[in-house]
Image (cartoon, grey):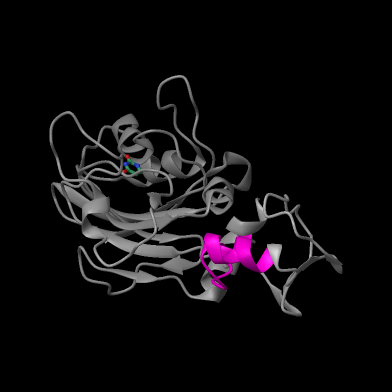
Amino acid sequence: MRLNKYIAAAGVASRRKADELTKNGNVKINGQTVTAPGTDVAEGDRVEVNGLAVRPETRFLYLLLNKPKGYITTASDEKGRPTVLELITDIEQRLFPVGRLDANTTGMLLLTNDGDFAQRISHPSNETSKTYRARVTGVLSKEKLAQLRRGVDIGGFTTSPAEITLLKQTGSSAVVDITIHEGKNHQVRRMFAAVGSKVLELERTAIGTVRLGNLKSGHYRKLKKPEIEALLK
Ligand code: URA
């Protein structure tokens, strides 16, 4: 990063003022006075202005949104549906959703401007667990539940073991909590389709150990530091 941008990003001065400070000999890199404003600052360099170390703020933000039905998680939509980014109103940084939820799915969605974080959470090798509450058609027999737990063929792909708790069964529909450790497109809907059930409602209630809790639909909050750390574990 150019020295003037670096100093400005640290909140010390504008880029122009930073150039002046540099030309006037007030800036050191690794203990050496530098007077060329165009100098590059490398990773790990120590920059001092008037004898004080400065560093650009890394303003990474991590939000947990309770996504309402009908909102899409991609940046734009040819059908003109609203995007989740429209719900984030008081944040300056440009955020993007971590992974995707179907338009009809509600619940926990993470948004961030930290690309490394997003990649780590989404990368299949990390097997970050995701828990959903689903209301589905039909009767989930013991055999069907066992099949879903073991893994089902969702069209050219067999799902890995999942945890399922049957919460309610009526004559025509069931409510379950299901935790999966991968994230194929429409995975939960396809898993239930594989045992003859249609998903009527789908809500993501947790990612890893971080839970949606009682955040209202359309509302969001910042993740707490221990939550960010838990997700990266
Ligand atoms: N599985 C689905 O089928 N849809 C989602 O939105 C998330 C998981």
Q: Residue furthest right?
A: 31
204 to the left or right of 79: right
Q: Nearer the viewer, residue 35 or 98?
A: 35
Image point (54%, 39%), residue name: 160
User: In the rendered image of this protein, does residue 35 appear above or below residue 73?
Assistant: below
Instruction: Choose top left, top right, bottom left or bottom right for residue 232.
Output: bottom right
Q: Residue furthest top?
A: 156
Number of dots carrying numbers: 0
State which image quarter holds ligand 1: top left
User: In the rendered image of this protein, does residue 131 appear above or below residue 144?
Assistant: below
In the rendered image, residue 99, in percent from the top left (x then y), is placed at 42, 44
Q: Is residue 19 magenta?
A: yes
Q: Is residue 144 visible?
A: yes
Q: Residue furthest front?
A: 24
84 to the left or right of 62: left
Image point (51%, 50%), residue name: 118
153 to the left or right of 196: right
User: In the rendered image of this protein, does residue 177 appear above or below residue 148?
Assistant: below
Q: Is residue 165 visible?
A: no
Image point (27%, 52%), residue name: 85
In the rendered image, residue 166, in percent from the top left (x then y), is placed at 33, 57
Q: Nearer the viewer, residue 84 or 55?
A: 55
Question: Magenta region's main secondary structure?
Answer: helix
In the rendered image, residue 28, in percent from the top left (x then y), is placed at 79, 67
Instruction: Choose top left, top right, bottom left or bottom right for residue 17.
Output: bottom right
In the rendered image, residue 221, in percent from the top left (x then y), is placed at 34, 71
The span shown in magenta is: 6-22
Q: Is residue 120 magenta?
A: no
Q: Nearer the viewer, residue 44 or 4?
A: 4
